[in-house]
């Protein structure tokens, strides 16, 4: 896969954020302004990814093509996630709330899920996944994979985080979001893995890796949301934590993967 200018931008941005994150870990800073600035740094990645993605989608014909539709929905989902994080930043700087969860920011995060799901479904048409579903092996894969992902999700929710998540003393709204995030991630992760498994033999050429990178982004997002919900519940979350690093990696993968579809670079 040949790197373009947008790919190079995201690689450089990731390098800076990694240095930033290492500095926070080494200094053990958890509640200073520099932690809040880290949050701003996270927000810029999906913002650029969404802008670049919408521009690239138009070059693919927008809604007229499967790839164009996939990029539009993926970019809009990423844009809503960015909006949620900008609201999170507003809470940090202007309302002096360093961990606004649950809050209005979560509305942006949650709205990103159906848009991402539509993007992944559109991507399936561009990768030939529907052809594999016509075979018995593909149909079996369609049934088994969601069960496997569901078991994995259940393990983390009710075994690893048992007694921590879904504590009614934390409030109904928090429980709703604690459920909404893993369920939404379960749906998208299942779709992403299905597309990867069903379209593997059809993936090839220049856009094989962009597709795989975007799908990998959803795997990392799955881990990030679980980590965030768990850490906020047990009281170990702070801006610049390990969960935040996973969010950075997920947003980087979205931006890098989407930018790799640019037909003019």
Image (tube, rainbow, N blue to C red):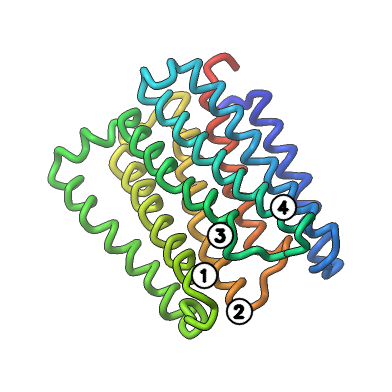
Residue 228 is drawn in which quadrant? bottom right
Residue 224 is tagged as 3
The residue that label 1 is drawn on is 174
Helix, strand or loop for disc 3: helix
In the figure, is residue 178 to the left or right of 17? left
Residue 173 higher or lower than 208, as above or below: below
Residue 193 pos. (x, y %): 36, 49
Q: Of all residues shown, which one is farthest toward the front?
A: 95
Helix, strand or loop for disc 1: helix
Residue 63 higher or lower than 96, as above or below: above
The residue that label 4 is drawn on is 89
* Cα distance in 3D space between marks 4 and 3: 18 Å
Helix, strand or loop for disc 4: helix
Of residues 1 and 75, which is closer to you in this image? 75
In the figure, is residue 260 to the left or right of 40? left
Helix, strand or loop for disc 2: helix
Residue 78 pos. (x, y %): 54, 40
Q: Nearer the viewer, mark 4 or mark 3?
A: 4
Quadrant showing the N terminus: top right
Q: Nearer the viewer, mark 2 or mark 1?
A: 1
Residue 206 pos. (x, y %): 47, 24
């Amino acid at each position: 896969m040949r790197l373009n200018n947008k790919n190079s931008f995201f690689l450089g941005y990731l390098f800076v954020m990694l240095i930033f994150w290492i500095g926070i870990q080494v200094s053990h800073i958890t509640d200073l302004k520099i932690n809040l600035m880290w949050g701003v740094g996270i927000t810029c990645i999906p913002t650029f990814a969404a802008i670049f993605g919408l521009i690239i989608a138009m070059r693919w014909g927008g809604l007229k093509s499967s790839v164009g539709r996939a990029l539009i929905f993926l970019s809009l989902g990423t844009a809503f996630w960015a909006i949620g994080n900008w609201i999170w930043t507003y809470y940090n700087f202007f309302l002096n709330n360093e961990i606004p969860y649950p809050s209005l920011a979560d509305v942006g995060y949650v709205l990103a899920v159906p848009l991402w799901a539509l993007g992944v479904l559109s991507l399936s048409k561009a990768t030939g996944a529907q052809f594999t579903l016509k075979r018995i092996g593909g149909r079996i894969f369609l049934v088994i994979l969601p069960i496997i992902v569901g078991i994995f999700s259940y393990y983390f929710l009710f075994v690893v985080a048992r007694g921590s998540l879904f504590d009614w003393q934390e409030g109904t709204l928090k429980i709703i979001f604690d459920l909404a995030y893993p369920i939404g991630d379960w749906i998208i992760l299942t779709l992403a893995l299905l597309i990867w498994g069903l379209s593997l033999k059809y993936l090839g050429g220049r856009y094989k890796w962009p597709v795989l990178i975007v799908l990998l982004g959803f795997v990392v997002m799955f881990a990030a949301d679980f980590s965030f919900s768990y850490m906020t519940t047990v009281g170990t979350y702070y801006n610049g934590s390990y969960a935040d690093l996973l969010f950075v990696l997920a947003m980087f993968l979205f931006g890098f993967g989407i930018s790799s579809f640019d037909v003019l670079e």
